[in-house]
Image (cartoon, rainbow, N blue to C red):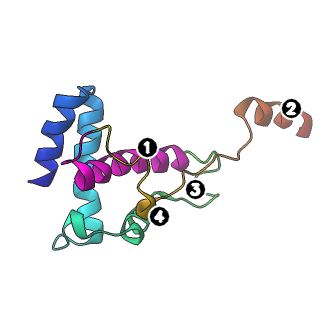
Amino acid sequence: MTICDYGIAMIRKVNPRLSYKRYTIQILPELSKAIGIERKFIDMTRDDVLFYLDNCRKPENEDPLHKWIGTYNSELVAIFRFFKWLHYSSIDNIARPANNTSFVITMCVKHSVSLQWLHQISYFGS
């Protein structure tokens, strides 16, 4: 029911694209399944969210271009927006705190080389 309420509130306030609505509605049940269905969203902690997000991480040999970082950051933003709505839905936007300090998770930064650079290197190596 919470996810439905969030979807309705999101449509009323933001009017997001259909793809973003689908993406968000897909992530939240996955988060719930990963943590445990019996646990309510309001009771989830930062560590629970990090446990879920750690499933996005891939080792270097599986993902040398670090594409998992884009997935991680996109899911983090969607989850953060949901929890901000969940904890502060009864407060007007102006009165809401800018940052929920009890739930701060930093985004991953991509430290990989560009494909063009890798392509140039391959010419020198042969």
Question: Of helix, strand and loop, which one carries label 3?
Answer: loop
Instruction: Tell me whether the residue at label 3 lies in contact with that at label 2, contact meaning CB atoms closer than 8 angstroms.
Output: no
Q: Residue 74 versus residue 89: which sits nearer the camera?
A: 89
Given this view, does label 1 or label 2 mark the residue nearer the observer?
A: 1
Counting other residues with Cα less than 10 Å from the Cα at mark 4, is it few (<14), some (14-19), or many (20 or more)? few
What's drawn in magenta, residue-wise?
68-92
Q: Is residue 67 left or right of residue 31?
A: right
Gap between marks 3 and 1 measured at Cα: 20 Å
Mark 2 sits on what residue?
Answer: 123
Question: Of helix, strand and loop, which one carries label 2?
Answer: helix
x%, y% of residue 122?
Answer: 82, 36
x%, y% of residue 119?
Answer: 77, 32
Residue furthest left in the image: 1
Q: Main secondary structure of the magenta part?
A: helix
Residue furthest front in the image: 95
Residue 74 is tagged as 1
Mark 3 sits on what residue?
Answer: 62
Mark 4 sits on what residue?
Answer: 54
Gap between marks 3 and 2 measured at Cα: 23 Å
